[in-house]
Image (spheres, rainbow, N blue to C red):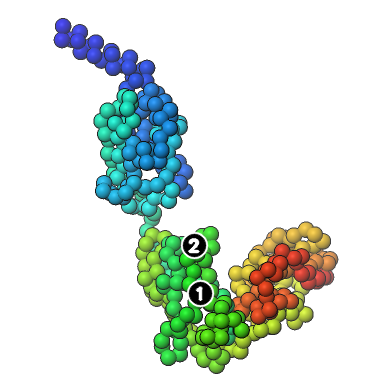
Amino acid sequence: MARIARFSTALCAAILAACGAVSTPEIALDLANPKQPSVIVRGLSRGDLGALTRAELTPERWASVLRVGVGADAPPMAGAYAVRDGALRFVPMFPLDPGRPYTVTFDPSAVPGLGASERVTAVLSLPMAPQTAPVSVAAVYPTGPTVPANLLRMYVEFSGPMGTRPGQDYIKVIGADGAEIPGALLPLDTELWNGEHTRFTVLFDPGRVKRGILPNRAMGRPLEPGTTFTIAIAGTWPDAHSRPLASEFRKTYRVGPAIEAPLATPAWQTTPPPAGSREPLRLTFPAALDHGLLQRALRVVRGNAAVAGVITVAGGETEWRFVPDAAWTAGDYAIEILPVLEDPAGNRIGHAFESVDPDDDTRAAPVRLPFTVR
């Protein structure tokens, strides 16, 4: 009889499983999309999956069913819940941090009628990325030794991805006397990173740089001609893995006269390459231009078709070079320059920063500099 009873119990369990009535919840990480890992609960029966779909839970109720947090007592993470692909899925609003443990609890009692009855808890974490050398400051732009007194913009370039902390907490402008120059930089909540988080834009306060407006009248420009200053970058600035930089970085500049004239293309010199070669086309400027904009505001065209190639900036941002993917053929070309191009003091073609109006249209037609390859 005992053997028959055991056989009957096993048979009933098999029948229930085949009918999708038995849930055996299992919590796991789904890493199919590396950019957006999600938490899933597998092993739920078709009946339980259907009940969750029909429940129309609020975000608060969802969090009571499937709770993801950095600890058992921490508030649940925000995110999106869905029942799909045979599992309950949670996609966090913000990416999970590699190596950080997350406590995940599935509690079926939060939805009456689910076949699963026992609460299941698991601690999950994303694998740590391979250890790499600490990130360091690779370059600071402008790269030349002298900047104008009305300097508006600088760039800090890193050897690897950085975290999301605001740069203003880690960058100081130090005067020749060794003291920080107060109010030199524009305090922004917005983070001025490129998409890869490897370049940070440093903005001097335009209200102090531009003459005649209240901050300038009250405090003057932060930089004075004939002096020096140091841009100091703290080594405590965390990278994408929350590690400090390899070291502190400092660079000292001389301050020259303010540049308050518009960019004037007649002063630029074009050096065309010979036909049949892949020698670079060179465009040189009498003073440094904005490093970041030089890489995206100029292109080479033949007729109306863009010429494919590689752009480099050299000579302390006083020279722009273009190497084509294929050898130059004889004929007429042009360099097209978008109206967003500026120098480090914010001057544009035909518009000095002192006279630029916020409503100036930077979507105007590009300026064209013709040249001939022979």
Q: Which disc number belongs to residue 78?
A: none
Q: Label 1 belongs to which residue?
A: 186
Q: Secondary structure at mark 2?
A: loop
Above/below status of 134 relative to 120: below
Q: Which residue is at a point 53% across and 77% down the rendered structure image? A: 205
Figure quadrant of residue 355: bottom right
Q: Which residue is at a point 37% across and 41% down the rendered structure image? A: 60
- Kind of residue at disc 2: His
Total number of numbered discs in the rendering: 2
Q: Is residue 218 left or right of residue 370?
A: left
Q: Label 2 belongs to which residue?
A: 197
Residue 127 percent location from the top left of the image: 36, 49
Figure quadrant of residue 37: top left
Near mark 2 (Cα within 10 A), the count class, few <14, some 14-19 or many ≥20, is some
Quadrant in which the C terminus is drawn: bottom right
Q: Secondary structure at mark 1?
A: loop
Report the residue that reaches farthest toward the left: 2
Residue 211 percent location from the top left of the image: 61, 84
Above/below status of 131 relative to 48: below
